[in-house]
Image: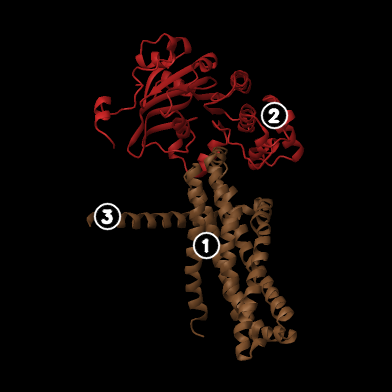
Amino acid sequence: MLDNSEAQQQDEMLVRISDVHYARGSRKILQGIDIDIPKGKVTTIMGPSGCGKTTLLRLIGGQLQASQGKVMVDGLDVHALNNDDLYNLRKRMGMLFQSGALFTHLSVFENVAFPVREHTDLSEPLVRALVLMKLQAVGLRGARKLMPAELSGGMARRVALARAIALDPMMMMYDEPFTGQDPITVGIIMQLIRLLNDSLGMTSIIVSHDVQEVCAISDKLYMISDGHVVGEGGPSELQQSGSDWVKQFMNALPDGPVPFHYPADAFAQDLLQGMD
Amino acid sequence: MLDWLQKLGQSGMGMFQHLGQATLFLLQIIISIPTLFRHPRLLVQELYSVGVLSLAIISVSGLTVGMVLGLQMYNTLVDFGTEDSLGPVVALSLVRELGPVLTALLFSGRAGSALTAEIGLMKATDQLSVMEMMAVDPVRRVVVPRFIAGVISMPLLAAMFSAVGILGSYMVGVGMLGVDDGAFWSQMQHKVSLGADVMNGVIKSVVFGIAAVWIAVFEGYQAVPTTEGVSRATTRTVVHTAFAVLGLDFILTAIMFGDS
């Protein structure tokens, strides 16, 4: 039996990741991760490249299976669901991929209309109205006739965002939304993430290593490194954290717990050894 | 020696694993076929891209093969004074063997490789992943229409190849070398049987079509999502299809014409 406070806490959390382990071959990527994502908030998962941030999003979306541990989304154990139930759950999730992943053979309009046409029987005028509303929200209503190849990187990501929110999901996952964008686009995407989260009553999970940007829009941050959660809290809490891991990351220090050098034999020994 | 045996065993296991995966993938496709009725437009689009766009290469190749066949056969037949048999000889060669086999090989080079590259690139650019996250099954939405379009297109393209090939040999034999027009067509009509020859050719082209498209979509879907991975998958599609078609052709020919 859960006591009242525990039950209340569970109600407040949309996603609960408990003791999750994940390995790719012999390489352990996640080693006992515990993360709680509160409803209606913007939560960011930070960490150095290759630490398993995107893997975590794919575990939440059920695209990957944890070798150990549980991922609960809205009270459902993602990895225990059958295919139909998983697909029903995914209809309530949105994901913005790092590349945007627009369908290259479809126009901007058709890309945004894709999930609407797949999952609803709305008439064509209604589909049009819905798509235009979503494109208006990301500022690209005027670009609806363009093809993905004609868009800049920032525009492509905004179209992908419009497509991801087309069915008003309860939760949005953003995979490195700021990577490779110019400062104006970064500003636009930051504003959109916060605005959409608050106005549509969604829950947002961002995976990123852009410290300044995520600190400006997140309610809660988790930092993972080497397969473990090494820090968590609000932006100001993390800025003042005493953890070496967190300090190195937040202050962009080139060396520290995350070493500058990839593990290797001693340099002198390597030089004297001759050819491999 | 032990190392060599180990490597042999490993590659054998890998091959059977690959075959098992491909079989499961085919079953998944077959199970998903009824969902195509919800999106018939997708099938029409793929029929155009897989079938109609292959027409040019199939027609030109058929015409050339028919012309060469007409010329070569005439030179042999004329020595025995049986040049009037040119029509049935060319027609039987095309309908029974060359039509289905060459069409499948050309189809694999034109449409099969394109299917693999397209699906592989969709995978490499996360388009398949994003579909999964939108609760849309990529096998149902991407693979099934392409598979069915390929299976429908192959026998039609093979028929086109044979028909154009016969016209090519007619142009050479009757038009240039003086074979009797009436003898060319009447002997063909007399010697080529609808059941034994034409239908067996159709069965061959359907079987080759299934094999060629199955290999193409499977290789694309299983491609390593990198530039090199997609390139290797495309090459594998063409090579594996060639082996599969030639192997199947021998087996089918032995079954169909082994007794006669």
Residue A53, given in percent of the width and then of the height, sits at 44, 28
Q: Secondary structure at mark 1?
A: helix
Residue A102, given in percent of the width and then of the height, sits at 61, 36
Q: Who's the residue at 49% across and 34% down the image?
A: A61
Q: Is residue A95 left or right of residue B182?
A: left
Number of residues whose C-alpha sits closer than 10 Å to that of mark 2, classed few (under 14), some (14–19) or many (20 or more) = many
Front residue of B47 and A120:
B47
Q: Who's the residue at 69% across and 73% down the image?
A: B168
Q: Is residue B163 visible?
A: yes
Occupied quadrant, residue A23: top left
The answer to whether marks 3 and 1 mark residues whose Cβ atoms lie closer than 8 Å is no
Q: Secondary structure at mark 3?
A: helix
- Which image quadrant: the N terminus of chain A? top left
Type of the residue with mark 2: Leu
Front residue of A256 and A169:
A256
Circle number at residue B153: none
Chain B, colour shown: brown
Between circles 1 and 2, the one closer to the viewer is 1
Read off the chain for label 1: B
Type of the residue with mark 1: Ala
The answer to whether marks 1 and 2 mark residues whose Cβ atoms lie closer than 8 Å is no
Number of residues whose C-alpha sits closer than 10 Å to that of mark 3, classed few (under 14), some (14–19) or many (20 or more) = few
Q: How far is mark 3 from mark 2, CA to CA? A: 58 Å
Read off the chain for label 3: B
Residue at image mark 3: B6
Circle number at residue B211: 1
Q: How far is mark 3 from mark 1, CA to CA? A: 31 Å
Number of residues whose C-alpha sits closer than 10 Å to that of mark 1, classed few (under 14), some (14–19) or many (20 or more) = many
Tally of marks: 3
Residue at image mark 2: A135
Q: Which chain is red?
A: A
Read off the chain for label 2: A
